[in-house]
Image (cartoon, rainbow, N blue to C red):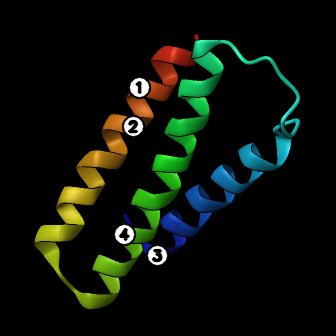
Amino acid sequence: MTFRQIKEETEKVYQKRRNWQGAKGPFDKLSINLRELVLCKQYILYRLQEAKYLKDKQRELFYLELYKITESYEKNWAN
């Protein structure tokens, strides 16, 4: 993943967070899990970018795999 791709994915996460309707609830379990997953994706993208800056290939691969896993979970839960 390039720095540009990381930035684009981070912007997608920011957009999802902007679309949240605040704390208007009650939330069902799925909504809570999806929000947690979006926050995890944001954290993973930050760590992936940091690993790229530090040129730490091992950490970069680790966070890239974590990101792919969270992507697949989000796609499965959203449907």
The residue carrying pointer 3 sits among few (fewer than 14), some (14 to 19) or many (20 or more) residues within 10 Å by Cα, namely few
Q: In the image, which disc is placed on residue 73? A: 1
Q: Earlier in the sequence, mark 1 or mark 3?
A: 3
Mark 2 is surrounded, within 10 Å at the Cα level, by few (under 14), some (14 to 19) or many (20 or more) other residues, namely some
The three-letter amino acid code for the residue at tag 2 is: Thr
| Side (left or right) of 33 relative to 2 | right
- Identify the residue position indicated by label 3 in the image: 3
CA–CA distance between discs 3 and 2?
19 Å
Which picture quadrant has residue 11? bottom right
Answer yes or no: do the residues labelled 1 and 3 have beta carbons within 8 Å?
no
The image quadrant where one finds the N terminus is bottom left
**Between marks 1 and 4, how big is the CA–CA gap?**
19 Å
Kind of residue at disc 1: Tyr
**Residue ID at (40%, 75%):** 49
Instruction: Assign a secondary structure to mark 2.
Output: helix
Mark nearer the viewer, 3 or 2: 2
Residue at numbered disc 4? 47
Sequence order check, earlier mark of 3 and 2? 3
Q: In the rendering, which numbered label is found on residue 70? A: 2
- Mark 4 and mark 3: span between their CA atoms? 12 Å
Residue 72 drawn at (x, y percent): 39, 28
Q: CA distance from mark 1 to mark 2?
A: 5 Å
Q: What residue sits 65% from the left and 21% below the top?
A: 31
* Helix, strand or loop status at disc 3: helix
Q: Between residues 29 and 37, which one lies in front from this camera angle?
A: 29
Q: Amino acid at mark 4?
A: Arg
For mark 4, give the secondary structure: helix
